[in-house]
Image: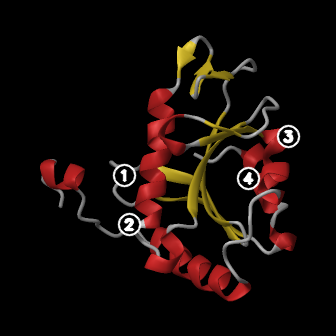
Amino acid sequence: MAHPVITAELERWRPRGWDVLHDVSWPGGHGGTSVDHVAVGPGGVIVVDDHDWAPGASTAGGVLVSEGHRRSGECRGVAARVSGVSALLLPAHRTATRGALALVRQPMPAMLVEAGTVVVGRPDLDAWRAGLPRVLDPGDVVAASEHLRGVLASSPPPVQLTLQGFLAGRG
């Protein structure tokens, strides 16, 4: 479930040409799982997973550690959500997709960690967005956003053929 603090932060992106979806179906997810946020704008398509861990998260050697635990599973979860959302896009937009794990209660400049995930603290989220290179023009933003809004807000989400789904008997 999307955290209201991150929801409010991402809503501030709208005047800068971004559309934001919150708590949408996760394509390829398991029973009731969702994607916290999907932001579509000039900097691409960003799948944001938020976490309200106690302050003190750190990174070393590309590994995220919070509350004394390595958070590899959470980083892989973001990567899986990025893959699911990316697969729904037109091929030209797929390379513009990235994932971020947003920390609700602490500052942390954006850092690339395991599974190609960026971890960033809430106070630094907007600065990270502002530094992204422009990869989508306004027409692409509208097209990708409308398409994702249509398929991710559907219930149930679209079925995707994945190896994991096939092996689980769902594909």
Q: Are marks 3 and 4 in contact (CB under 8 Å)?
A: no
Q: Residues within 10 Å of mark 4 (few under 14, many from 20)?
A: some
Whether pointer 2 and pointer 3 mark residues with C-beta atoms closer than 8 Å, the reply is no
Q: CA distance from mark 3 to mark 4?
A: 13 Å
Secondary structure beneath dot 2 equals loop
* Residue ID at (45%, 74%): 151
**Which of 132 and 144 lies nearest the eye of the viewer?**
132
Give the residue at x 48% y 55%.
82
Q: For marks 3 and 1, give the one nearer the viewer.
A: 3
Neighbour tally class for label 1: few under 14, some 14-19, many 20 plus, Cα within 10 Å? some
What residue sits right under mark 2 in the picture? Answer: 157
Residue at disc 3, secondary structure:
helix
Q: Give the label on residue 131, or none.
A: none
Q: What residue is shown at x 36% (from left), y 66% (from top)?
A: 156
Is 162 left or right of 69, judged from the image as shown?
left
Front-most of residues 136 and 38: 136
- Residue 52: horizontal and vertical position, in percent? 68, 31
In the rendered image, residue 72, in percent from the top left (x then y), is placed at 47, 28
Residue tagged by mark 3? 123
Mark toward the start of the polypeptide (2 vs 1): 1
Circle 3 or circle 4, nearest the eye: 3
* Distance of label 2 from label 3 (alpha carbons): 32 Å
Residue 112 visible in the current orientation: yes
Above or below — where is 143 with respect to 116?
below
Quadrant in which residue 163 is drawn: bottom left
Q: Earlier in the sequence, mark 2 or mark 3?
A: 3
x, y percentage for residue 19?
Answer: 71, 71
Q: For label 3, count other residues whose C-alpha is less than 10 Å away and answer few (under 14), some (14-19) or many (20+).
A: some
Q: Which mark is residue 7?
A: 4
Check disc 1 and report the residue beneath it: 29
For the residues bearing labels 2 and 1, Cβ distance under 8 angstroms: yes
N-term mark: 3 or 4? 4
